[in-house]
Amino acid sequence: METLPVPRTSPVPFHRRLPTLLTLPALLLVLLVALVGALLTAPAAGAAEFRGEDRVVVAADEVVDDDLYVTGETVVVDGTVRGDLLVAGGSVTINGTVEGDLMAAAQTVVIEGTVGDDARVASQVLLLGEQARVTDDLITAGYSLETRPGAEIGGDVLLGAYQALLAGAVDGDVTAGAAALALAGTIGGDVQADVGSVDEVGAAWAPTTGVAVPQVDPGLTLTDAARLGGDLSYRSGTEGEIAPGAEIAGEVVYEPVAVEEEAAAPTGALALLIAGLRLFVTLLLVGLLALWLLPRTMTGAAGALRARPWLSLGWGALAIAGTAVAVLAVLVVSILLAIALGWLTLAGLAAAVVAAGVVLDLVLVLGLVLAVALLAPVVVGYTAGGLLLRDTAPQHFGKRVLALALGLLIYVLLRAVPFLGPVVALLVALFGVGALVVWAWDAARRNRARRRADRGGYAGAASGDPQRTGSWQAGPGHTPQAGPQRLGPPSGQPTPGQPLQGHSPEGPRAEGSPQQTRPPWSGDGSGRQDPPEPPR
């Protein structure tokens, strides 16, 4: 499409282009959520049909009475689907009729037939042919959208794409975020667009598909065939090209995006110096917080790294790889569990399971990123600084800070060396994460051993085992004497309340033992001992 040259203006800064850049991933996320939600709720109906092959064809004389779920490399619908059509594949072609919603995720989607309700499409290329009709709204995200003359959309159009050419008819409003937007058809409502400009949009990568992709110039363009029944409101770095024959019933509101020239970013040695300084300050602040709030973690991880460096390296690799596998496993398990719950008509619980899986994955990914990018360099730097100062366990906080700063300075300098920097960053991540894992494992083992010792000590006190409690018992040769007698401790032993000779009145507890001694007349823990019967 040919356009007249436009004057160049200042480039649009990134923060002003951010809404346009976020439109595509946001719409794509909405479409994926809609697909998952439909998959979870559909089994409750009990009559949906599933098909999955390399090539799936719904013949022209075939009628699917309910919803249809399809996966395949090539999907062609020539017949009729009386419910919704949810499809994921390489190429999707709709020549027949879908009486419900169309939800598609594919490389190319071509609609030549009729969609009875909404169409939600995420694809590289979406084409609505001359016979295409979407009864309600069209929501799409991708590289290119084209509606050819004769195509009809009964509702609104919401799009996020690199380029879009609307030459068909749209009964409702058009809301667009695109680098290049051309209007060459009829639009019954308003048009609100955030488009690029000649300055900021260069040659873009175009996907190679079996569908012809039109060439749309950057910015906003209205041809002589454009007919707008409402207002035109758009934001751009350059004013749109509106042909003399274009008709706009409402107002035209242009919001220019013109800012001062941004200062050129530093390059060369100055850029490396600034980047290194930022990295050093960031890691130093994180390290100071760790030394202040988590001193045992820092000293413990540093000690584990000094004592067992190769074990730390191995555990670091296992931890990073294991976290990646865990993220994938959580996602797969949550989806499978949600599908199973969907078959049991528990759609609400299935959605909660998927949400919980997504949250857990986000936590795992965030934790791994923080450990690799921040904690690992701090641990390794603190350890290396202590070795250089010949004080592996500094007692004073000031000396700890000095060791941390010295180690981080060396790390930042090594990171700035070409080719060596990525290797250093990888090794530091492996050693640092591994040291944290080893320290955490050792701490957990010590806590378990301490709890077992505590439980064993109290159990020994209950069972009367002298080896476990330190209490005295009658020897194996001791037998009770016949005749009535007053129960009491054996001869030579202290009476109750009298301290043992050479011991404090508190008994074994004063020596640090958590157990209390039990007198022999209190039984062996299994029950009370009765006194011997008198002779008859």
Image (tube, rainbow, N blue to C red):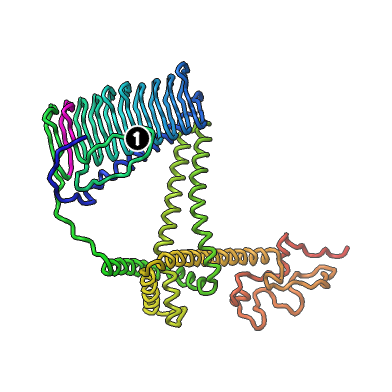
Residue holding disc 1: 125
259 or 185: which is nearer to us? Answer: 185
Q: Is residue 137 left or right of residue 247?
A: right
Where does the image place residue 500, in percent across and percent down from the top left? 67, 79
Which residues fall within the magenta stretch?
221-236
Q: Quadrant of the N terminus?
A: top left
Q: Is residue 134 left or right of residue 365?
A: left
Q: Name the residue at 39% across, 64% down.
A: 374
Residue 386 picture quarter: bottom left
Q: Name the residue at 40% across, 36% down.
A: 107
157 up-or-down from 279: above or below: above
Q: Is residue 338 left or right of residue 459?
A: left
Residue type at tag 1 = Val
Query: Is residue 183 inside the magenta stretch?
Result: no
Where does the image place residue 154, in percent across and percent down from the top left? 28, 23
Residue 256 picture quarter: top left
* Residue farthest along the top direction in this orientation: 61
Mark 1 secondary-structure assignment: strand
